[in-house]
Image (cartoon, rainbow, N blue to C red):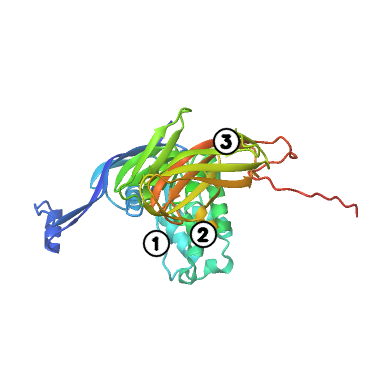
Amino acid sequence: MNKVLEVKNVSKSFKEYASEWARIFSWFGFNFNPKEEHHILKNINFSINSGEAIGIVGQNGAGKSTLLKIITGTLKASEGTIQVNGRISAILELGMGFNPDLTGRQNSYHSMGMMGYTIEQIDAVINDLEAFAEIDEYFDQPVRTYSSGMQLRVAFGVVTAYRPEILIVDEALSVGDAYFQHKSLNRVREFQKQGTTLLLVSHDRGAIQAICDRAILLEKGAVIKDGNPEEVMDFYNALIAEKENSTVKQVVKEDGDIQTISGTGEVQIEDIGLFSEKGKKVDYISVGESIQLKVKIKVNQDIEQMVLGYVIKDRLGQDIFGTNTHHYNKILENLKKDDTFEFIFSFCMNLGIGSYSIAVAVHANDTHLSGNYEWRDKALIFNVINTSKEAFVGSSWIEQKVEVIHV
């Protein structure tokens, strides 16, 4: 496949000098050593093929926005090269430089002109852009009167008025309302089908896994993971957990799938299983069947508090349902080394037909992001089949009462 973007050995650092004169003289080749140098990006390498959708993820300060600015040409790399084959459209910052005293329409003409479009080309799409933004009479009002969501609507309309070869979106869609998020993502998917390459920066696991073919994880300015979105997001999820003296590891299971495990090890998960009403361990479950999830844990060190939770995920790794014992006021306290416990969650499997996984976490507080003793992704895999219910589609089983009245 044709490469539309290639990032080779890109590094970026910002230097602090003892004085502004030292900084200026350094521009002309004089050897003034900087007082301090901050390395934001370190030897970044990756390439993207035509039509791929790539997610860029990482904690705040990892270097994501700096990387995108270098790719779009608004910032120069200290080392390395960027090769771009195609027109880039990007929303890197909300409002993308809109003049607050100009109207949405005027800013649209100005921004698209800066992107290289002619007046005739803008005239041809301005009505469609206005209709897509759906801000009515505000399109001809000053942008300073806009909410952040309204600015996003116009900005997204501008960068997608014509289908770009490469579309870059940096967290902007998280600002919009739910309706516009769906509308924007539908347009992104349409562009993907037509061959647009997408580079998406987001903390939204669902968006990354639903849209992207690959995900790249940045940590402290370096690429530490590049691969399957679910695998990368599982690793990222473990990474952002508070993990003083903890470890994050990924292991290859017997079926070739990759499992992420993290935690301090003060508590360990010993066994997990799904059981039928008859007490039989099962991995094939009928729609609507009563089931029990049993998790056995062992305490390896004295701890003050413990909560256990789980989440069911679909085959794409997106969360279907999750809860933990904190929400049911069943928090265990003052636990001793070698204590063992079995947790039992009883429920009906009201899910649609398909393959699912369960992730389990045991931690100190209300979420595994703090005091993470052990977080185990893909702790078990199970399948839901329909043996007794009427035919249906979708991810959930909802009991129906159907009436037909002749009027």
Answer left or right for 279 relative to 19. right
**From this viewpoint, is residue 354 visible?**
yes
Secondary element type, mark 3: strand
Q: Amino acid at mark 1?
A: Gly
Calculate the distance from the C-alpha at mark 2 to the C-alpha at mark 3: 36 Å
The location of residue 193, given as percent across then percent down, is 54, 39
Q: Residue at x 42, y 63 (%)?
A: 98
Q: Earlier in the sequence, mark 3 or mark 1?
A: 1
Callout 1 crowding tier (Cα within 10 Å): few <14, some 14–19, many ≥20? few
Secondary element type, mark 1: loop
Tell me, for residue 176, which label it has, or none: 2
Front tag of 2 and 3? 3
Callout 3 crowding tier (Cα within 10 Å): few <14, some 14–19, many ≥20? some
Q: Residue furthest left?
A: 31
Secondary element type, mark 2: loop
Callout 2 crowding tier (Cα within 10 Å): few <14, some 14–19, many ≥20? some
Residue tagged by mark 1? 97
Q: Is residue 120 above or below residue 150?
A: above
Q: Amino acid at mark 3?
A: Phe
The location of residue 316, given as percent across then percent down, is 53, 40
Residue tagged by mark 3? 382
Residue 313 vs residue 71, the one in the foreground: 313
Corner quadrant of residue 11:
top left
Answer left or right for 280 relative to 215. right
Q: Residue at x 57, y 56 (%)?
A: 128
**From this viewpoint, is residue 55 visible?**
no
The location of residue 291, given as percent across then percent down, is 63, 42
The location of residue 16, given as percent across then percent down, is 17, 58
Q: Amino acid at mark 2?
A: Gly
